[in-house]
């Protein structure tokens, strides 16, 4: 269970990026965070894995507060939090399977990581995960030769091999065509359920959020406007979030 309590963050004095944000998410749930540009969505995700230090509040992952963790504890916590990025963050010149195995680096000494030492079990697991994301035959291909949608699926396999409790996705489909976007969202939804993890995705596409997410969190000007089951999200709530009615094709 992930619980965020009264999270606050200011990048500059008198300019609040997050104000008293609280929400909780159960394992197996796929959650979308939506809201206008600059609302604070990325700041929330970065706080959740402590890439940025928030100012106050609590971030409890299975009752352990990430904010008060020491360096060693934080390293351990970060293994349990996978990241998926808009621009994939893969090593393009390396093969697909090597990129997936990079997800194990948090479990290794620096030396073993530098020399790319992975166990047979890790290699087998990488192949199983590549099969799950539909890329088994691409294992030995360089990532530079893949399409955007395929690269994002490698990113999903890389995050799963971490054995995460949480996967954070910062605009995971922003660089993808509509068909690849649907494939990636469907995969994230299915794998979230199958592995009983928590998946949180920042999204600008309201229709996609409503179609795939179990729960939708709306953020505006650093404040939480709503936290509701996707099915309950009304037109009035969306209009409040964006300060204007949301057009038909986006709903
Ligand atoms: N490193 C930073 N230094 C100063 N201000 C920042 C920094 N990062 C973000 N901000 C400010 O914090 C606020 C929230 O930004 P954030 O990137 O979290 O919004 P967002 O909802 O993710 O936006 P977008 O949808 O455009 O990605 C904005 O006002 C932004 O200008």
Image (cartoon, rainbow, N blue to C red):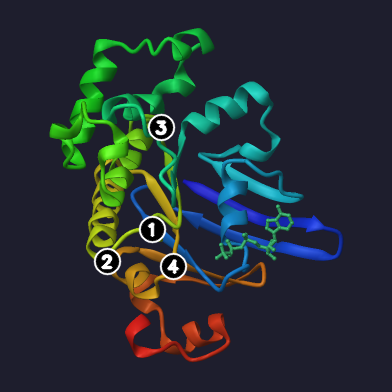
Q: Which residue is mark 1?
A: 175
Dot 1, how many residues are within 10 Å of its Cα: few (below 14), some (14-19), or many (20+)? some
Residue that protrudes farthest toward the left in the picture:
137
Which residue is disc 4 drawn over? 216
How far apart are the alpha carbons under marks 2 and 3?
25 Å
Return the residue nearer the eye: 49 or 85: 85
Q: Nearer the viewer, residue 41 or 223?
A: 41
Q: Position of residue 180 (x, y in %)?
A: 25, 58
Q: Is mark 1 within 8 Å of ligand 1?
A: no
Q: Is residue 131 above or below residue 17?
A: above
Q: Is residue 186 left or right of residue 167?
A: left
* Disc 3 element: loop
Please state which of residues 60 and 211 is positioned toward the viewer in this rendering. 211
Closer to the chain start, of discs 2 and 3, is 3
Describe the element under mark 2 as helix, strand or loop.
helix
Return the disc, 1 or 4, that comes first in the chain's sequence: 1
Please tell me which residue lies in front, 201 or 249.
249
- Whether residue 11 is visible here, answered yes or no, is yes
Dot 1: element: loop
Crowdedness of circle 2 by 10 Å Cα count: few (<14), some, many (20+)?
A: few
Task: Say the numbered circle drawn on residue 178.
Answer: 2
Q: Position of residue 226 (x, y in %)?
A: 53, 73
Q: Nearer the viewer, mark 1 or mark 4?
A: 1
Q: CA distance from mark 3 to mark 1?
A: 17 Å
Seen at 70% across and 35% down, the residue is: 68
Estimate the x, y position of residue 249 in percent, counting from the top left. Answer: 33, 85
Q: Which residue is mark 3?
A: 91
Q: Nearer the viewer, mark 2 or mark 3?
A: 3
Asked whether, in this view, residue 11 is left or right of residue 183, the answer is right
For label 3, count other residues whose C-alpha is less than 10 Å away and answer few (under 14), some (14-19) or many (20+): some
Gap between marks 1 and 2, in whole Å? 10 Å
Residue 75 image point, x, y percent: 57, 26
């Amino acid at each position: 269970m992930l619980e965020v309590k009264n999270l606050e963050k200011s990048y500059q004095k008198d300019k609040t990026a997050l104000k008293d944000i609280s929400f909780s998410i159960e394992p197996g749930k796929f959650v979308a965070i939506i809201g206008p540009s600059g609302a604070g969505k990325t700041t929330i995700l970065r706080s959740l894995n402590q890439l940025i230090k928030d100012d106050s509040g609590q971030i409890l992952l299975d009752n352990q507060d990430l904010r008060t963790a020491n360096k060693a504890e934080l390293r351990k916590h970060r293994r349990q939090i996978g990241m998926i990025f808009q621009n994939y963050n893969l090593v393009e010149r390396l093969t697909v399977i090597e990129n997936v195995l990079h997800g194990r680096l948090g479990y290794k000494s620096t030396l073993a990581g530098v020399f790319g030492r992975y166990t047979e079990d890790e290699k087998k697991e990488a192949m199983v995960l590549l099969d799950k994301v539909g890329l088994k035959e691409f294992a030995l291909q360089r990532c530079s030769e893949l399409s955007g949608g395929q690269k994002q699926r490698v990113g999903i396999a890389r995050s799963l091999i971490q054995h995460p409790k949480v996967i954070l996705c910062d605009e995971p489909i922003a660089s993808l065509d509509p068909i690849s976007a649907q494939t990636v969202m469907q995969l994230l939804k299915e794998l979230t359920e199958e592995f009983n993890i928590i998946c949180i995705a920042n999204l600008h596409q309201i229709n996609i959020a409503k179609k795939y997410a179990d729960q939708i969190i709306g953020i505006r000007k650093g404040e939480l406007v709503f936290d509701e089951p996707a099915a309950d999200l009304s037109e009035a709530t969306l209009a409040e979030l964006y300060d204007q009615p949301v057009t038909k094709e986006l709903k």
